[in-house]
Amino acid sequence: MKNCKQNLSLLLGLFIVAFSLTACGSEKEAKLVNTQTISAKAITNISLDYDADDLRIENSSGKAIILKEYLSKDKQKYYSTIDQKNHTISMKEGKRPLGTTFKSKIILTIPKDYQGKLNVHSTSGKITTELSDQTLDGISLDTTSGVIETGDLKSEGILLGTTSGKIKGNRLITKKNLHIQSTSGPLEFELLKAKEIELQTTSAKAQINETKGSLDYETKSGNLMLENFSGSGKLIANGDGEIRATFKEITNHLSVFSKNGDITLKLPNTETMDLFVKTKEGKIDNQRQELSERKDSHGAKVEVETRNGDITVN
């Protein structure tokens, strides 16, 4: 009798495991279940607000705005809601089933000649943009913990934001302001080009391969790595953040400060600048001493300072 109960318990356990595996594997892959076409005529603002859905925004030579929804469960209540008021179109996710196996992907196609604003928010989904050869009036992309990946972006103004998600961009170009904000999510960009660039982080790591413009950078404990920087501005780490920067050209006043982190700078091979370096408790290795010993002004003013961090200038 005892062996019989043991065998019964074993069979019951195997049944539960098999049922669980079957249930987990029963969720279908997301497939195209809904397509909505909206006239782009007179539209000047497109807004998307989603939670966990992956969002892809691309352009085409067509004249309409097309929303395609790929869902692993096809129910009308899961379809996006679209609200059009005056010149604005707002798109939001539909209802979602309980559980974590539901899969969804949204693809939005906009006309290549659309020149209005684009605002996209995702809580934890991935935002991808492919908008080459298109200039918009304004772009705003933000996520809480998701990922933002942009191709080339051109706009009158660009705003990117994240809390803990990653932002990775190719070439971001604007005639006006470019604002990027991250709490702890890492930032990677190929090119940032704007009249005014604002980069604010708390503890995020930021890496930019090329920068053109006036850069206002501020962090508490994040690290910054700049390559091929042409411009001016302020680079400030108010805590333990480190700053490493290589400059192609310094066009105006440049100020670099870190409270406790190290600063490493490689300046342009020119003498058209005046260098001022100081620290309270750190060490200084200044290989451009000739820029610090002149009485008369010779161009852009470069100020480098730490409290406890070391300074290296080449």
Image (cartoon, helix red, strand yellow):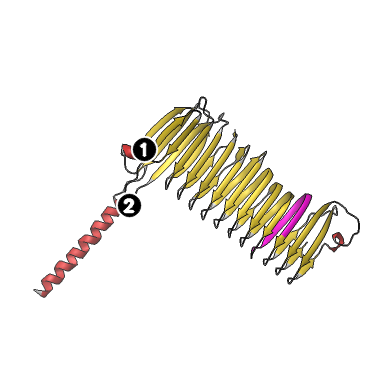
For label 2, the residue is 99
Q: What residue type is labelled 2?
A: Gly
Q: Is residue 186 above or below residue 66?
A: below
**In the shown orientation, is residue 96 left or right of residue 172?**
left
Mark 2 residue element? loop
Q: In this view, does 157 lie above or below 245?
A: above
Q: Is the C terminus in the top left, top right, bottom left or bottom right quadrant?
A: bottom right
Q: What residue type is labelled 1?
A: Tyr
Mark 1 residue element? loop
> Is 253 covered by the magenta stretch?
yes
Which region shows up in magenta? 241-256
Where does the image place residue 110, in percent across and percent down from the top left? 51, 32
For label 1, the residue is 79
Q: Tell me the chief SS of the magenta region.
A: strand
Report the disc number at residue 144: none
Residue that appears at 49% across and 51% down: 144
Query: Picture quarter containing residue 297?
Result: bottom right
Q: Which of 243 and 170 is in front in this view?
A: 243
**In the shown orientation, is residue 90 left or right of residue 230?**
left
First in residue order: circle 2 vs circle 1:
1
Callout 2–callout 1 Cβ contact below 8 Å: no
Where does the image place residue 120, in percent across and percent down from the top left? 50, 41
Whole-angstrom CA distance, mark 2 to mark 1, is 18 Å
> Is 230 covered by the magenta stretch?
no
**In the shown orientation, is residue 184 left or right of residue 214?**
left
Residue that appears at 76% across and 51% down: 248
Where does the image place residue 173, in percent across and percent down from the top left? 64, 41
Q: Residue furthest bottom?
A: 2
Residue that appears at 31% across and 48% down: 27
Q: Is the N terminus in the top left, top right, bottom left or bottom right quadrant?
A: bottom left
Query: Picture quarter containing residue 91?
Result: top left
**Circle 2: is it few (<14), some (14-19), or many (20+) Cα within 10 Å?**
few
